[in-house]
Amino acid sequence: MSPLIEVRDLTKHFPITRGILVQHKVGAVKAVDGVSFDVNSGETLGIVGESGCGKSTTARLMMRLLDSTSGEIRFEGQDITALEGSDLKAVRREMQMIFQDPFSSVNPRKTVGSIIGEPFAIHKLYKGTGERKREVQDLMELVGLNPEHYNRYPHEFSGGQRQRIGVARALALKPKVLIADEPVSALDVSIQAQVLNLLRDLQRTLGLTVVFIAHDLSVVRHMCDRVAVMYLGKIVEVGKSDALYDFPRHPYTGALLAAVPVVDPSRHGTKRRLLTGDVPSPANPPVACRFHTRCPKAQEDCSQVEPPLQEGGSGTVVACHHKMTREEVAEIGVSWG
Amino acid sequence: MSTGEPLLRVENLKVDFPGEDGVVHAVDGVSYEVHEGRTLGIVGESGSGKTVSSLTTLGLTRRQGAVISGKIMFDGRDLVTLPEDELRSIRGNDIAMIFQDPLSSLHPLYRVGDQLVEAVRAHREMSKQQARERAVELLGLVGIPDPRRRVDEYPHEFSGGMRQRAMIAMALMNDPKLLIADEPTTALDVTVQAQILALMERLQSELGMAIMIITHDLGVVAEMADDIAVMYAGRIVETTTAERLFSAPEHPYTWGLLRSIPTMEGYTWGLMKAMASEGPPGRQDLVPIPGTPPSLINPPSGCHFHPRCPYSQPEHTRVDPPLEPVPGGEHHQVACLLESDIRRRLWEQLRAGQTPAEAIAEVEMPEAPL
């Protein structure tokens, strides 16, 4: 079966301009720079990375909230990067998004009923008032909101409940794909678990395909079947979660996993290898392998030849000339199999 | 916990903010100690009072019209009643603080070095040249490359991690005895967070200061703290050593927190992998704490946690539990009305992967939970 979504060589360069009256381009922030991956029907694909790695830009490109510079995004075999008008509207019905901040992603002047019902208005569905209200209340029930709160305003809800409003709105058109950009990072721990469980339940019952963008690696492990790790606009490693967390091959994946503080004081004392320095600017990324300036394993060839994404031999696809070995993974204590 | 006189002793601290809708009881009778050279972690969710209690230590809630009672003993002086000018000589000097957002804690129009110089010259007689040398030395100590050049740069020229390093350097300018770090890494990426946490640990072992770290992240406290206090609705509900908190937690809220966080292994905390893979799908789901944190204006009667506690008994709506030593547990205090024997049996069930409902079915409760 072919994948539901195929992303090929996707790039997004934001121009850096100078000048007041006449703007001329002096460079580009290469937010996403040649990214390829598949999303299979019914799976949850996680995209992880640090701020500025391009994970949110990738999500926005897939939703067509941003126009790509080049590359293809095929949804059910059809390239959607150039779609416009009613064709685009039809595709957007199939892909919906939930955002990070439940406070700014809902309009404070509208009632919850009209927020969740807005997709129906846009797509001219359920035109009868009673009919639309019934649909909205069903959705509210589905995401664990009290349907009687139909006429309330967002400020009357807590952060977790507002995130449920966002989920209900995203599900209104019965999409095939849900793109969740940091859906729980603004929530408290106890509420985060409620929303994560809701997303998992919905995926099971509705058979959704989910693209889950997050920076919290334990949340990603919990939620995702496959994970793609991004660094400076590129995917450095992608594979099944079990394989990637058990035997990370890319030194950056290893460094990310090693950096996570672990809720287990008995595990402390394992030698942690910390990355030094900061992420370089995406306006002027290092040549060849972008990680070579910070990589503990970097050799001469890393700054000369860009490593292609290839099978790493342990279940993941990895872009690295000098992959981590079992011994190295054990040494930094990042095997979570 | 070490013996001897603590560096900071907070006793029955209460901080109320009168407002239009009523009085917000942000901190409601909190007591804890910070010992020399040790790290106390305060964990809690938004609105649990963890930040307000630490700001009050430095007198930073006074201007917000807070009504403060209780004692904050530092070096033989009570910081609650200390006059503002004396408090000012402690703030930034003996007790220093770093905040969550390093960009808004640094003045954007002043060079980083000048801000460090100001911090030290506010408290001691030192020539500008000497102070500048100290700034360069400390920027080097916190790991800023090329400190002699960087000292003359502006905050916007620093990355997020470097800004937090600069904040730490500023806090250390006066050799504080106590460093209060309020969510010091929340705004940072994981790899940078790991750098900052490692830096704080290194500095503590080199300089011997005490650290109070306030965070919502259980991983961060597990990594950093010697002792941990868990706060809920303005109170400490459990406090003990880091080791004990994660191996033998006593409070249902602490259990709830532990069971609601995903782990790197992909199954929930305490749940063995073998158990996660058997049984119906959903077996390895997180177990969230039901409901939402309570209002601090009208907190629930009795135990503040009872409306969200799966094990609460009818009398828990009336009786307010004090923070009491756990029988048999050294340096372990908990504010829970369940009998300690029942608590222990419940936790055994929970750590074996049972849900709260299954645990209740196994353990004979005196009365059916509410």
Image: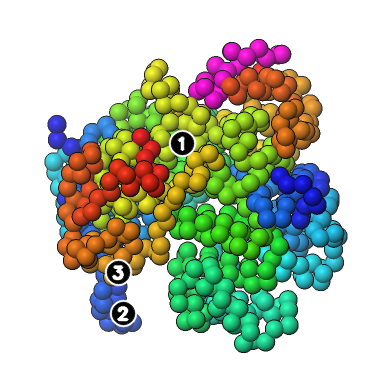
Instruction: Please provide percent x and percent y for residue A291.
Output: 29, 60
Q: Residue at x 25, y 50 (%)?
A: A323
Instruction: Please provide percent x and percent y for residue A215.
Output: 40, 49
Nearest the eye: A102 or B204: B204
Can you tell which quarter of the image residue B98 is in? bottom right
Which residue, given by chain and number where applicable, does mark 1 sit on? B262
Which residue, given by chain and number where applicable, does mark 2 sit on? A18
Q: Residue at x 53, y 60 (%)?
A: B199
Chain to which mark 1 belongs: B
Disc 2 to disc 3, how far (Cα)? 14 Å
Callout 2: SS: strand
Instruction: Tell me the number on the disc at residue A135.
Output: none
Q: Determine if residue A72 is in view.
A: yes
Q: Residues within 10 Å of mark 3 (few under 14, many from 20)?
A: some
- Camera-near label (3 vs 1) is 1
Instruction: Please provide percent x and percent y for residue A1.
Output: 14, 31
Q: Is residue B208 magenta?
A: no
Instruction: Please provide percent x and percent y for residue B132.
Output: 59, 82
Chain to which mark 3 belongs: A
Which residue, given by chain and number where applicable, does mark 3 sit on? A283
Chain to which mark 2 belongs: A
Q: Residue at x 75, y 49 (%)?
A: B33
Q: Which residues are magenta?
A: B349-368
Amino acid type at image mark 3: Ala
Can you tell which quarter of the image residue B336 is in? top right
